[in-house]
Amino acid sequence: MPELPEVETTRRLLAPYLEERRIVEAEIRHPRTGRRNENPQDVVDRLKGRLVHRLDRHGKFILGRLESELTWVMHLGMSGRFLIVSPEAQEIAHTHFIARTDRGDEIRFIDPRTFGFIAVFTQDELEAELRLGRDAFIDLPRTPQLAARLNGRKAPIKSLLLDQRIVAGLGNIYADEVLFRAGVRPTRRGGGLSGQEMTKVRKAIGPILKAGIAAGGTSLSKSGYRSPEGRSGEYRRKLFVYGREGDPCRRCGTPIERLVIGGRSSFYCPDCQV
DNA sequence: CCTCCATCCTGTGGGC
DNA sequence: TGCCCACAGGATGGAG
């Protein structure tokens, strides 16, 4: 269920354990977790013995830059999370991937719904597999570029914000929060926004994501997001609209409404958002 | 190319 | 209290 802030929180906590470390052991425990490589065994073979230079993030993907121009790709899907433990630590349910570093730490991937995956791609494979727009946080396009991508599109702006090929990183929660901050209804057609509205949407993205990251992400339920340290995110308390159907708008008091757009729950204030 | 929709899974929270 | 099922923060591929 993680979006950019949850993935970034995860990346920051993993980085000290992985950067400039060598992977000495790796194991894929569940075939679905390795499904994005042609052969799941490739993940293990390409990881073993390799040095991780740096841990990057693009949208909701964590990218480990390896030796030999390989990239270790990690996606949390809906229910994925990482743990850093000692090899003796008891294993919890749904542990689908394990790697050990030359420092003796174990990185474990837990993913009940198996929508997440672990892969290792060559540069060509990476380009073919990850079709992503620019990162919504560290590389957000300027308004004219964004406008060009939305121009002529009839789909609801909410759906377009979720399209990772346009801008990478926003998910269902933060897209709703961005649209609230921008004062734009999620049902509006992307191509129908005025220049001013486009600017407002664009300008809302940075602060919302920054606040989400500062809070360590959003955890909606007990089985929701947890960092590699096992902590929940605190951003839930700061949400303006997501999950607040019927509750008073924090700005104007009007009850928040919910509707389904593109099969996803969407929350908005009928008074603040035009 | 665009839009819409089904699909892959398990856990749980809310309604009855 | 217990049971049941709608629903969940994502990505993708295919139909039209």
Image: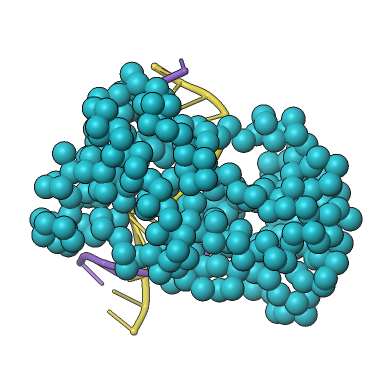
Chain colours: A cyan, B purple, C yellow
- Please say if A142 is above or below A247: above
Viewer-proximal residue, A18 or A248?
A18
- Please say if A77 is above or below A16: above
User: In which quarter of the view is residue A81 placed?
Assistant: bottom right
Question: On the rendered structure, is A116 left or right of A214?
Answer: right
- Please say if A39 is above or below A7: above
Question: On the rendered structure, is A243 left or right of A172?
Answer: left
Instruction: Please name the residue shown 22% across and 48% down the image.
Output: A268
Q: Is residue A246 visible?
A: no
Q: Is residue A273 visible?
A: yes
Viewer-proximal residue, A120 or A12?
A12
Instruction: Please name the residue shown 79% across and 48% down the image.
Output: A66
Quadrant where the C terminus of chain A sits is top left
Residue A26 at what x, y percent from top left? 81, 59
Q: Residue furthest right?
A: A49
Instruction: Please name the residue shown 25% across and 34% down the image.
Output: A197
Residue A40 at what x, y percent from top left? 77, 46
Instruction: Please name the residue shown 74% across and 59% down the image.
Output: A19
Residue A56 at what x, y percent from top left? 65, 50
